[in-house]
Amino acid sequence: MRAALTIDNYGLDYLTASGVVPVLRDVSLAIAPGEVLGLVGESGSGKSSLAWALMRHLPANAREISGSLQLGDIDLQSLTAKQLTAVRGRRIGMVFQDPSTALNPTLTIGRQITEALMRHRDLNARDAKALAIELLGHVELRDPAAVLRRYPHEISGGEKQRVIIATAFGCRPDVILFDEPTTALDVITGARIIDLFARLRAETGVAALYISHDLAMMTRVADRVAVIRHGRIVEQAKASEIFSRPQHDYTRSLIAAVPRPERRLVHDIPGTDVLLQARGIEVQYGRAGLFRAAPPPATKAVDIDIRAGEIVGVVGESGSGKSSIARALTGLARFSGAISFDGGTLRGAGDMGAGYRRDVQIVFQHPDSSLNPRHRIGEILSRPLKLYGGDTAAVPRLLEQVRLPASYATRWPHQLSGGEKQRVAIARAFAARPRLVICDEITAPLDVSVQAQIIDLLLALRAETGAAYLFITHDLNLIRQIAHRIVVMRHGQLVDSRAIDAFGTDDVHPYTRELMAASPAPVG
Amino acid sequence: MTELLQRMIRKPQGVIGLTLLVALAILCLLGPWLAPYGPEKMDFLGRFRAPGWQNWLGADQFGRDVLSRLLSGARATVPMALAATLAGSAIGAVIGIGSAYLGGKSDEAIMRTNDAVMAIPGLLMALLLVSTLGNGAGNAVVAIALAFAPGMARVTRSVALAVRNQDYVKAAVARGEAAAHVIFREMLPNVMGPIIIEATIRVSFAVMLFATLSFLGLGAQPPASEWGLMVADARQYMHRAPWILIAPSAAIALSAIAFNLVGDALRDALNPRDDR
């Protein structure tokens, strides 16, 4: 039987001013009809470039140096621009990473679906609309006829991704490329999208290339998994076997980096004296206007205690108010309620003196935006030293503390990788010798192996300095490895708070159970 | 500094812009000595003489050499326009960033006041100020600077609002940094790009505003050879001797282009991310 998609000995370069950068080398993959091939790799491994090469939408500085791309019997590389329009969408579909930018914000959902259907299925407007309603109903959207009339900003991220998936499947292509379709969504929504994908592929028998950085998820969506590193395929195996019998060292290191809740990384027990006690923290964004009521508060009367040296995990889906807590505790958001810290009581950002600011530090989610692009690393690190009293000669020591060479002090942030930037942000927080560090989703944008290194670093720093952590995350498996206590938030409310020993018991909140079901431990 | 220059001349636009600007600077410094005739030297036999070997760019209604007037007028035109733009941009930038940093009600108050000032047309505003402060080139600079500030404040604020939400600004606020540090050290360097672009475009507007003020008798006074004044004077002889109009207009356009190109090159060179 002929393969649905064949990539043979494919090589790709990017031409840049600093020379030729190899992106893909000797990539050979074949996807049989109805098969799902998972492609796993870290950022920069070339996996998205492969997807764009297949869609024939490469940047102008890309050079294909070898190999062939075959979709069934079509040679993709020989197609003219006009022939391509008949192949894209109809024969090969694509689902993008970020649903919020994949739909045109100025057109209704209906326009965008029916346009694709009319073009690729040769339907008239009336039939296309009927089919669109059927398709949207099929991806479990409530009231599809109403959704057709809405604009993208009027539906949620998960719903948008369903619309895109419905459009891709609706054109009945031979192959669909999925480029990290759940990365931009929160855990529970992502888990539902994966369930939907499994059902649709069982029904339609479409072949798919599923690109992801998440090895654990691959075992649930793919038949076969290929591991890509620096543009080369290092290993291909059945999805059921890759975890139990990895062949390549790199695959083994990837598997080792996947967080597993049963493997605890923290073994000590924190002290009993409470470091920070927050009572009735309520964060409210926006005020009531003349004609509109105030929006609901982002958090509703949340109580949190953090003991000295304790690691407290805060989990919940996006919009649950986790980050608002971090912003209240650092004085970035206006809040009502009281924070007791070190014998004093704070009722607002104005009460936070230099002492509190030094003791409570925050590390942000996005390493790209948390370092000022116009400041060198040395200047970034010397700020807290100048502010809180310290010697700027300590910058090399700070860099060494986060396992970076001292020569990095003269570099610009953009010359560092994401993981290195996050290390600098951590060094900046620890420059103040804090007693509490708030980590706001700091591992979310990083690759698993980098994530594991950052966690190791945080634990080593904690052993050195005795700082407590408030660790905000949506990765339940990760937080179960390190936290002493886990707090679960939903819709701005604290629904569950329990010590890690009591986390697996039967009396957990139903929502906590749902979260645990959505992030299953990797098999094997 | 040399590194910055090297980065600027990496693209042809930067080279052209810098060359034009250097030429302009030479004109401002040495113009009167380079001129073949005195700027006010009249020649009644040579009125409206077409460009030729005697007068390279022709002569005007009094037989004055247009080239000589351009050369000696450069120092009356370019430094003034530059000073007015710089002052206006600086005031506007500080208002804009400060307003974005403060946010909330202070932001509303500052920006609504700003909008009210903006509602007065720039020329009217400048006229008002000059008639209050008195005639003369110095007061015209102040007037144009103040007329430019609200527009710059708007442009700056829109960029600064995005920068305000960046995590490095939040980190600085959470660290307890003083407002001045956050505004000048954290935010200002990251909004410089749009400010420079806007400012370079406004240099050419400033030249024209000066011309208008001079034309209305409130800026430079005849027989000064300020370029805008020359355009205004030449207007009535446009059909008879177009070169009197074209030469100073071209000079204004070229200096505007020079500032724009240099502004573009500067923006690219100032961006550490741009390593191409």
Image (cartoon, coloured by chain):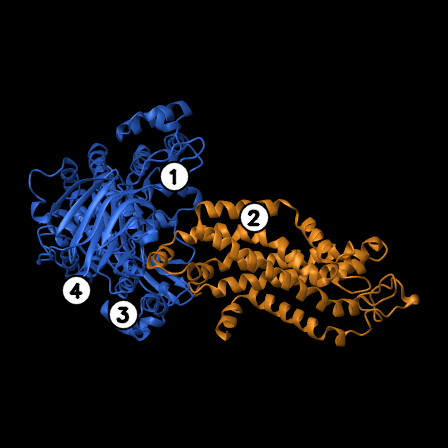
Chain colours: A blue, B orange
On the same chain, marks 1 and 3? The answer is yes
As helix, strand or loop, the secondary structure at mark 4 comes to helix
Tell me the subunit letter for badge 3: A
- Residue A273, picture quadrant: bottom left
Tag 4 or tag 3, which sits nearer the N-term? 3
On the same chain, marks 1 and 4? The answer is yes
Q: Give yes or no for contact between labels 1 and 2 (Cβ–Cβ under 8 Å).
A: no
Per the rendering, the mark at residue B114 is 2
Residue A511 lies, in percent from the top left, at 17, 37
Disc 1 designates what residue?
Answer: A103
On the same chain, marks 1 and 2? The answer is no
- Residue A491, picture quadrant: top left
Q: Give yes or no for contact between labels 3 and 2 (Cβ–Cβ under 8 Å).
A: no
Q: Residues under labels 1 and 3: Cα distance? A: 42 Å
Tag 4 or tag 1, which sits nearer the N-term? 1
Name the residue type under label 3: Leu
Tell me the subunit letter for badge 4: A
Circle nearer the viewer, 2 or 4: 2
Disc 3 designates what residue?
Answer: A399
On the same chain, marks 3 and 4? The answer is yes
Disc 4 designates what residue?
Answer: A460
